[in-house]
Amino acid sequence: MTHDSTLQDGDFLFENESDAGSQPDKRVVWRVLLVDDDPDVHHTTVFAVGQRHLVGRPIEFLHAYSAAHAREMLLTEKDLAIVLLDVVMESDTAGLDLVAYIRQIANLSNTRIVLRTGQPGYAPELDTILKHDINDYKTKSELSQLKLLTLLTTTLRSYQQLCAIDANKQGLSLIVRASGSFMQMQGLGDFAVGVITQLAALLGTHPQGVVCAQTQRQSNSYSVLAAAGRYAAHINEPLESLSNPAIRQRLIEAFDNCNSSFGSHDLVLYFGQKSGLDMAVYIDVGHVPGPVETELLNVFCANLSACLHNQSLIEQLRSTAFVDELLQLPNRSHFIAEIDARQTAQVRQWSMALVDIDDYSSINELMGHHYGDELLKALAIRLQTSVGPDIMLARVSGNAFGLLGPDQHINPESIILATSTPLMVENRPHKITATSSFVAIGEDLHSGADHLKNATVALKQAKRLRRGSYVVYTADIESEARNRAVLLAELHIAFDRQHLCLEYQPQIDLGSGRLIGLEALMRWRREDGQMVSPDRFIPVAEQSGLIVAMGEWALNQACALMKQLMDNGMAPERIAVNVSVEQFKSPGFFDAVMSALERADLDGSRLELEITESVAMLGSEHVKAQLSRLREHRIAIAIDDFGTGYSSLSYLEQLPLDRMKIDKAFVRQLGQPGSPRIAEMIVKLGRTLGLKVLAEGIEDRSAWDALQAMGCQEGQGYFISRPLESAKVRPWIQAYFASQEVPPRAYS
Ligand code: C2E
Ligand code: CA
Ligand code: CA
């Protein structure tokens, strides 16, 4: 071996060997293990290489003077690029044995092996070279300084490539794994933390950096979503708060130019989306990323952009799944999940409430959907103000809100307070009433969905009993609801099997005794012969919508009877049929009335429809129009149970009505001394409005007399006749006419 340290071309050659693009890294060296029992060889090799950089780095030699010594070092030393190995040491095969050891025991597959021997005769067999992946075999005399340096250079290159392939493989698998974990992350914050961790793993450094993202889509403000290492304090702060101006600037540039940039010891990666959230990472790497790392980082960024896109889709989905779009409040699912969480935490003295705006659908119909939306917003603000900011307010259905919190905040008073003064909707005051229900949380094992169901059951009861009131859920309510469900099922069957029938109650002129009408009243006799009161089954039918079909049936029946009576020359002026709100609101109502008249060949003037105040309270132009249309066909309209509802008189005045019916409750009061004379007021009111007034529930002579005295012209009641089965109507009329002193006026 020649020791020519003045080889200028060699220096030149190797100085150009540094990797294109990247500067030599002073801190990183190539580690070469020299194994030779001749100390001289160690010296000359070290001397030949000198301070040169090969493939961008200086060489650090490690020295072993025997195969045994080498074995120890092979197990402990890291990152050995090359083993320069003497073939003959302790024994003739010591070197070759060591080759097997390097590959099989020390498990170093990337480390390159170069064999050197004093004599050509000790050359290993070709298959040994192949089997153990030996890079080169040289006789020591061949190795001039130039040749040694060339040999080391090419060998280092192949080591570097092997490592790159390895890193690539590991990096890619890291990226694949990272994508998997990104997809499982809950929210952008987690995602951002993941980015730093995964990047650090990929670059083999400690996590040290920040992730910034837009605080809002298409906005110009950015904040720190995640931060690690010495930047940790900046989490959740605006980008501007980063103390290092250079880092701040680099991140801003990344956002402005939508690209990544690599510094001498750090990098900024940009992974934004055209239409979505922008995100950029600044990370301290501590070294310049080599070509492999750069390649991997590109893959990582592309992959991350895709993940980020998915992530923001997931966020969007999650938010649509849990947030009410219109009010930006938690929605039903969120509310249920929240109750579940309270149940799990076994909270004590917590409640939930449902608050339902009365007649919301008619407000929507009357004032338009935009108005309806604004009203919801106004009420949401009212409710939250009334119960306090710590109480969860959710929108659980179209017009119902859910409240969840400690008992002292969830109570009827705070809800009444919220609706006691008119809301401001589109700059106008709008008074609403709301019905609510309350359920205690945490005292049983019910799920959130069960609680909400119970609250709904209680709410329905409250609505049924009295709108604008509230009901606290109890187990009784639940059993009551169950009974109603059973009753409804039975009613369906009874209706299908035509087990329903009508009875007719005469209505007369109190002065002349003239028969003016018959009111059709529905009856249900069970198969066991028991009667079910209409006060029980009508509300159930109303609630389920079955009333629409039942009402239509009643109209047909009543009109047919009326026709029969006319044919027999014993018809009263008209027949009155009750109409429920649900029926009145149903789209086919008008046509159903017309077809009943047509089928019976009856003129509209022989029919009266009894609507309740709740129909009047629907309060829309639609009601007025519908009533006018009916009256155009000469159908009379009576307002039933007057005085029990809450209709506004001014509104009532505008409705095209013919008759007012005084509820029997007020007629009953007539006999009681000192009770309010509501009947009298109603009579006066009717007269003022130009309406006829009919009193129902006349049970004795005194009521009759009292009513007549106050100017009430018409009445019905047990004192006149109980409701009559249809077969008994004709005999009753015959007998009635006969009993009248004045010969009855027959209508035909
Ligand atoms: P309503 O329309 O107020 O009917 C009058 C109720 O008073 C009837 O009760 C009738 O039998 C009862 N009544 C009549 N005279 C007297 C009396 O002197 N004393 C007392 N205590 N009660 C008297 P009914 O038949 O039990 O019907 C109850 C309610 O069911 C009706 O009240 C009405 O709201 C509803 N209903 C009955 N039939 C129908 C129908 O075909 N369609 C609809 N939608 N509702 C109906
Ligand atoms: Ca009635
Ligand atoms: Ca009535």
Image: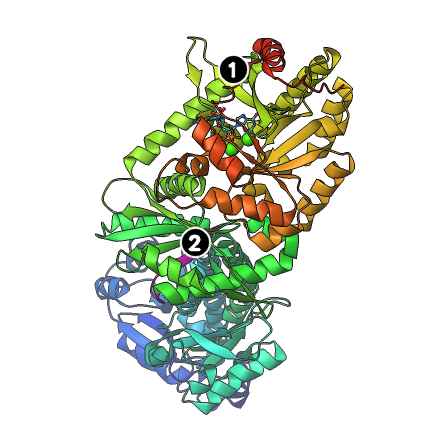
State which quarter of the image contains the N terminus. Answer: bottom left
Q: Where is residue 702 shown, x and y percent of the image?
A: 44, 30
What SS does tag 2 mark?
helix
Up the image or down, 557 lies above or below 625; here it is above
In-image side of 738 versus 155 (left or right): right
Q: How crowded is mark 2: few (under 14 residues within 10 Å), some or many (20 or more)?
A: few
Up the image or down, 225 lies above or below 470; here it is below
Disc ID at residue 403? none
Precedes in sequence: disc 1 or disc 2: 2
Residue 107 in sight = no
Residue 14 lies in the magenta-colored region = no
Circle 1 or circle 2, nearest the eye: 1
Residue at left offset 69%, top offset 46%: 624
Residue 466: quadrant of the picture: top left
What SS does tag 1 mark?
helix
Q: Where is residue 639 shown, x and y percent of the image?
A: 59, 39
Disc ID at residue 494? 1
Residue at left offset 59%, top offset 57%: 372
- Disc 2 target residue: 184
Q: Where is residue 671 shown, x and y percent of the image?
A: 39, 35
Q: Closer to the camera, 548 or 748?
A: 748
Q: What stretch is highlighted in magenta?
A: 388-396
Q: Which amino acid does label 1 sit on?
A: Ala
Q: Closer to the camera, 166 or 628?
A: 628
State which quarter of the image contains the C terminus. Answer: top right
Residue at left offset 50%, top offset 73%: 213
Q: Closer to the camera, 743 or 412?
A: 743
Up the image or down, 252 lies above or below 617; here it is below
Residue at left offset 47%, top offset 60%: 329
Q: Which amino acid does label 2 sit on?
A: Gln
